[in-house]
Image: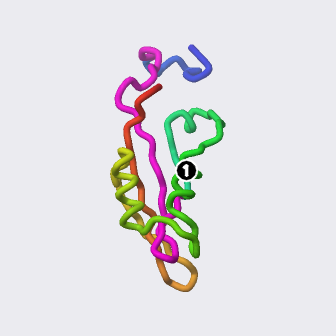
Amino acid sequence: MSAENPSGLLPQGPEPQEWQGQRWEYLVVKPIEDNKLKVLGRIEWKFLKGDTEKDTVADFYNKRFGAPGEEGLSIKESLNLLGQDGWEMAGATPTYSMDGTGTPLLFFKRPVTSP
């Protein structure tokens, strides 16, 4: 018997092991005004485990992409930059505001090369 299995009726399997397969990091991107992209955030396996180090990836891309009204890359140039950096599109989903207009969220992934 254990705290997880107080009755002792469930079979006890081997101890859980950490995943040894390919790890991915994900980037969430949104098209914004002036034909630009904005990185909303990054999801990486180490952040899911509770690490809280500053994520500089979103800041890096947002500076390159430029804010509305600023010089920067077009959507096409931004997508090409992401591709050159190893990001591939993994999916998209629409988002809707109260007035019924929508903007997609774009999800990109790339392999994590170091543990």
From the viewer's perspective, is 76 left or right of 62?
A: left
Vertical order, 26 against 73 (above or below): above
Residue reaching furthest bottom?
Answer: 99
Q: Is residue 23 part of the magenta span, yes or no?
A: yes
Neighbour tally class for label 1: few under 14, some 14-19, many 20 plus, Cα within 10 Å: few
Q: Residue at x 42, y 17 (%)?
A: 13
Viewed as shown, does residue 65 lie left or right of 52?
left
**Quarter location, residue 94:** bottom left
What residue lies at 50% left-to-right and 66% top-to-bottom? 72
Nearest the viewer among 95 and 84 is 84
Residue 115: percent from left, percent from top? 47, 25
Residue bearing the label numbered 1: 60
Q: Secondary structure at mark 1?
A: helix
Q: Residue at x 42, y 61 (%)?
A: 78
The amino acid pointed to by label 1 is: Phe
> Residue 40, located in which quarter of the rendered image?
bottom right
Up-down relation of residue 32 to residue 20 (above or below) = below
Residue 97 percent across, percent down from the top left: 55, 78
The residue segment tinted magenta is 12-39
Horizontal side, residue 36 vs residue 109: left or right: right
* Residue at the image position 41 percent from the left and 65 percent from the top: 93
Looking at the picture, how far across and down is residue 100, in whole percent?
Answer: 50, 84
